[in-house]
């Protein structure tokens, strides 16, 4: 070997030996398996599907560090026990809607649906940039869970009825499947509200256990077959202008996640919230046309006199709910303060442009 070649190799070897070893890459956390329950039937349009999408997005965004085992309603725990399952550690997280838990806190009404309340866009604005999220966190703190907004179905329908609602008196004696404050409003007008899990709505309507039923809107209602068992469909509903969906995490489980995984949870929930509203909007538009043309559904609107009375009773109910405890009073005040501003803006914003669109297109 030439001397010059030997000198080059010796110099290279010496230099290599003197170089510090590269620091090993920071090890990622071990894969975590999380148990997730929902209050929806498997693959139910909108709600069940978007719960699945959230779980898949969480796994993907975490790079596989979070594995989600998803259980639809009734598979691991009954529908209305999902919050307790998360609270007690039977499940790590759940996809649901807050008003299923108002027996634990009346404040939770304001994070699902308030009669004649905020639309989905208005609610999201209050939650994201107003006081909503902080108040929601406070409402759930005693139960050891942390909530994340998971979207909305948009404005819901008023529901299916076996008779026309021409006057307030037509609610008398009506056994009607409905959840939330809307049920209390109808009760005060003489109806008998019944809360059944989503998967049991169609069998109850088919069997005559209820005289009518509220579910969500054209897409879900047709998919559940409700149009086969009631003649009249009232739209829009008064009770849920922009109902909220949620992902709730066991607080200890969430706090144990690394900061980047906590950010992944927030990002997955926020992305799901946008996708969920778009999903419902698109498919309700599509289903509405098919509902009229293929299924010959008779769509009605509540008469103005009925709406006015529903409004009067709704205000009475909200005042009583607000007086139930100090936290609910603060939530009510914040919600109504933003709602009042949104109402003043609406005729010059979205409501205004919708009115002009109707005039422009006839």
Image (cartoon, rainbow, N blue to C red):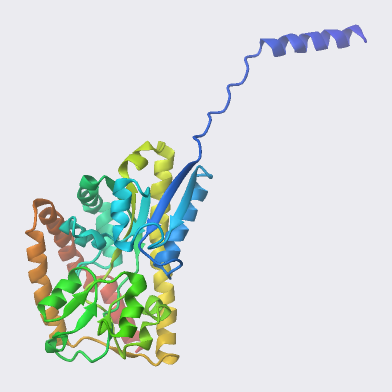
In which quadrant will I find the C terminus? Answer: bottom left
Q: Position of residue 320 (x, y in %)?
A: 7, 64
Residue 294 seen in this snapshot: yes
User: Which residue lies at the image location 37% right of the left edge and 50% below the top edge?
Assistant: 91
In the displayed structure, 136 sits above or below 45; it is: above
Q: Position of residue 6 (x, y in %)?
A: 86, 9
User: Which residue lies at the image location 25% right of the left edge and 87% below the top edge?
Assistant: 301
Q: Is residue 91 left or right of residue 161?
A: right
Q: Residue reaching furthest right?
A: 1
- Compare residues 102 and 295 and report the one nearer the observer: 102
Picture quadrant where residue 226 is located: bottom left
Residue 216 seen in this snapshot: no
Q: Position of residue 50 (x, y in %)?
A: 43, 62
Picture quadrant where residue 299 is located: bottom left
Q: Position of residue 282 (x, y in %)?
A: 43, 73
In the displayed structure, 137 sits above or below 95; it is: above
In the displayed structure, 307 sits above or below 64; it is: below
Total numbered circles? 0
């Amino acid at each position: 070997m030439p001397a010059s070649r030997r000198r080059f190799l010796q110099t290279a070897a010496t230099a290599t030996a003197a170089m510090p070893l590269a620091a090993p890459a920071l090890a990622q956390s071990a894969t975590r398996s999380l148990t997730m329950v929902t209050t929806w039937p498997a693959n139910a349009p909108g709600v069940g599907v978007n719960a699945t999408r959230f779980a898949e997005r969480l796994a993907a965004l975490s790079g596989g560090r979070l594995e989600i085992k998803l259980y639809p309603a009734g598979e691991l725990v009954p529908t209305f026990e999902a919050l307790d399952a998360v609270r007690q550690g039977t499940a790590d997280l759940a996809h649901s809607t807050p008003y299923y838990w108002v027996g634990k806190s009346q404040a939770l009404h304001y994070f699902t649906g308030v009669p004649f309340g905020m639309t989905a866009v208005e609610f999201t604005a209050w939650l994201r940039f107003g006081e909503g999220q902080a108040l929601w966190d406070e409402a759930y703190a005693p139960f050891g869970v942390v909530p994340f907004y998971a979207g909305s179905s948009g404005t819901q329908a008023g529901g299916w009825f076996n008779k026309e609602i021409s006057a307030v008196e037509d609610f008398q004696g009506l056994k009607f499947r409905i959840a939330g404050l809307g049920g209390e409003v109808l009760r005060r007008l003489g109806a008998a509200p019944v809360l059944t899990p989503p998967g049991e709505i169609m069998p109850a309507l088919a069997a005559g256990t209820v005289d009518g039923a509220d579910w969500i809107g054209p897409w879900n209602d047709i998919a559940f077959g409700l149009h086969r068992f009631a003649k009249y469909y009232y739209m829009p509903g008064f009770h849920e202008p922009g109902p909220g969906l949620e992902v709730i995490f066991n607080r200890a489980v969430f706090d144990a996640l690394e900061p980047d995984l906590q950010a992944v949870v927030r990002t997955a929930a926020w992305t799901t919230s946008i996708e969920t509203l778009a999903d419902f909007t698109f498919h309700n538009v599509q289903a509405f046309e098919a509902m009229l043309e293929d299924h010959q559904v008779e769509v009605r609107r509540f008469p103005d006199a009925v709406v006015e009375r529903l409004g009067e009773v709704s205000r009475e109910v909200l005042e009583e709910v607000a007086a139930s405890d100090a936290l609910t009073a603060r939530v009510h005040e914040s919600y109504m303060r933003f709602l009042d501003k949104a109402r003043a803006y609406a005729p010059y914003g979205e409501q205004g442009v919708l009115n002009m669109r109707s005039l422009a297109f006839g």
